[in-house]
């Protein structure tokens, strides 16, 4: 087995009780039948036998296999097996082997692309967020030892290559990473270009596409909108392919390569940057979206750390009753001030978040490439809103001589709490799908989010 990881994950080591948060709280943790059986064997005849029997219960949904049991939680939402030092009592007494896969692997995220296992990281862990956001070389990918890629057998397979959508996924993903790394353009312009690239690919490269080869030669058709209904902004690259036969597949291959090559061009990025700069959109809707996302999560999350920060952020924008337009004015003023003080540092946070997002969340799991980009930009928007509303950032703007370490600490907290309590929540993902809409409207709504950044 070969494995690779961005450099920050090769550096990661759990800091245990020194951590400002705990991964053993707020999450529903399943345990597989095999790990559950091993744990029962290990605790048999010990004082923990009764605890394990009482605190791990069959999955109420009736699932088996990897989801057979559920670890119990205390009233405060922490894992029932967490000890007084905020460490796992099961691991301390019986070793890492008895832990559920999620507990053992977290914050590592394992993905198998063909024969290659990739290890990325979840920013829901404060130490992972620190390492990812703050080191300039954090997202340089390099080989790692098999020992670092814990339990590679649980890696999700996202690119088997047995269909055109996954067969070309790595090529498309590398183009996405290159585009995000184009430092000559502002970050928002790179995201806009990413959305345009997804739009140009979207009528022939999508799950279930037949454009790259079909015995029946059926016309390729995206799942949510016809090519004829696509918006005019697609530009000259959206030329049509032949209708049938091997020539059609060759044309699709050539078209994919041509679109990706076009977005490698400095002229294309410069042109799209100019288009984005010329586009005027109100910021109130962006502010309203961010505030609504966080309000909905406040009602569902019990973490004092999360709720305290959300309360402070809401107050910094004028309180719950502030009109979105007014909140946007505050945000835009802070954005401009922070840009003049620490622009490069803030750019690094969001670039690293985006690069990690592409590695952490394979776009092949989305309904389309454009939907995957939309979700990336929505997540970045919510974090931007939290960061600019963070009380430490407010204080820094009032006292420009404040050391950059204060900004770093605020960024780590903002990105981490959003990753832990918002980004993966089913309610947030449902909201994102509804907000994105279908077909051409997805790109139009993406523009609102990009302009807010």
Image: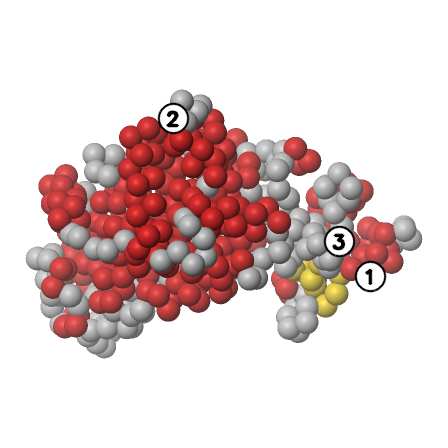
Q: Secondary structure at mark 3?
A: loop
Residue located 73% across and 44% down the image: 88
Q: Position of residue 257 (x, y in %)?
A: 19, 51
Q: Secondary structure at mark 2?
A: loop
Q: CA distance from mark 3 to mark 2?
A: 45 Å
Q: Which comes before the other along the chain, label 3 or label 2?
A: 3
Q: Quadrant of residue 378?
A: bottom left
Above or below 448: residue 435: below
Residue nearer the viewer, 183 or 265: 183
Q: Secondary structure at mark 1?
A: helix
Residue topped by disc 1: 53
Q: Quadrant of residue 344?
A: top left
Residue nearer the viewer, 402 or 367: 402
Q: Which comes before the other along the chain, label 2 or label 1?
A: 1
Q: Residues within 10 Å of mark 2 (few under 14, many from 20)?
A: some
Callout 3–callout 2 Cβ contact below 8 Å: no
Residue topped by disc 2: 400
Q: Residues within 10 Å of mark 1 (few under 14, many from 20)?
A: few
- In this rendering, does residue 437 appear at all? yes
Q: CA distance from mark 2 to mark 1?
A: 56 Å
Q: Which mark is residue 292?
A: none
Q: Which mark is residue 80?
A: 3
Q: Quadrant of residue 216?
A: bottom left
Residue located 69% across and 35% down the image: 17
Q: CA distance from mark 3 to mark 1?
A: 12 Å
Callout 3–callout 1 Cβ contact below 8 Å: no
Q: Position of residue 159 (x, y in %)?
A: 40, 56
């Amino acid at each position: 087995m070969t494995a690779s990881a961005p450099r920050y994950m090769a550096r990661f080591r759990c800091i245990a009780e020194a951590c400002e948060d705990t991964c053993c709280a707020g999450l529903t943790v399943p345990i597989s039948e095999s790990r559950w059986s091993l744990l029962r064997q290990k605790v048999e005849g010990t004082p923990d036998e009764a605890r394990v029997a009482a605190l791990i219960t069959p999955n109420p949904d009736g699932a088996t296999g990897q989801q057979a049991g559920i670890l119990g939680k205390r009233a405060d939402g922490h894992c029932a097996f967490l000890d007084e030092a905020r460490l796992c009592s099961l691991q301390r007494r019986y070793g890492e082997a008895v832990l559920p896969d999620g507990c053992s692997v977290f914050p590592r995220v394992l993905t198998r692309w063909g024969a290659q296992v990739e290890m990325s990281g979840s920013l829901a862990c404060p130490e992972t967020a620190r390492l990812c956001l703050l080191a300039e070389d954090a997202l340089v990918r390099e080989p790692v030892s098999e020992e670092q890629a814990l339990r590679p057998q649980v890696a999700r397979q996202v690119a088997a290559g047995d269909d055109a959508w996954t067969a070309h996924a790595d090529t498309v993903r590398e183009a996405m990473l290159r585009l995000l790394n184009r430092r000559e353009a502002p970050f928002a312009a790179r995201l806009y270009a990413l959305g345009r690239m997804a739009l140009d690919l979207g009528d022939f490269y999508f799950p279930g596409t037949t454009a790259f080869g079909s015995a029946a030669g059926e016309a390729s058709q995206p799942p949510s909108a016809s090519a004829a209904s696509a918006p005019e902004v697609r530009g000259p690259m959206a030329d049509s392919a032949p209708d049938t036969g091997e020539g059609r597949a060759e044309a699709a291959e050539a078209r994919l390569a041509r679109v990706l090559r076009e977005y490698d061009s400095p002229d294309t990025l410069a042109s799209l940057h100019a288009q984005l700069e010329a586009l005027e959109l109100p910021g109130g809707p962006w502010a309203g979206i961010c505030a609504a996302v966080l309000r909905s999560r406040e009602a569902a999350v019990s973490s004092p750390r999360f709720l305290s920060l959300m309360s402070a952020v809401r107050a910094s924008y004028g309180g719950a009753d502030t009109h979105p337009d007014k909140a946007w004015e505050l945000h835009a003023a802070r954005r401009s001030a922070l840009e003049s003080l620490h622009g490069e540092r803030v750019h690094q946070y969001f670039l690293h978040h985006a690069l990690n997002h592409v590695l952490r969340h394979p776009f092949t799991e989305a309904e389309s490439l454009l939907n995957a980009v939309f979700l990336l930009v929505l997540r970045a928007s919510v974090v931007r809103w939290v960061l600019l509303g963070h009380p430490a950032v407010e204080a820094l703007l009032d006292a420009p001589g404040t050391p950059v370490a204060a900004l770093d600490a605020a960024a780590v907290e903002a990105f981490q709490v959003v990753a832990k309590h918002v980004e993966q929540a089913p309610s947030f993902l449902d909201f994102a799908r509804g907000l994105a809409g279908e077909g051409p409207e997805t790109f139009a709504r993406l523009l609102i989010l990009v302009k807010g950044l």
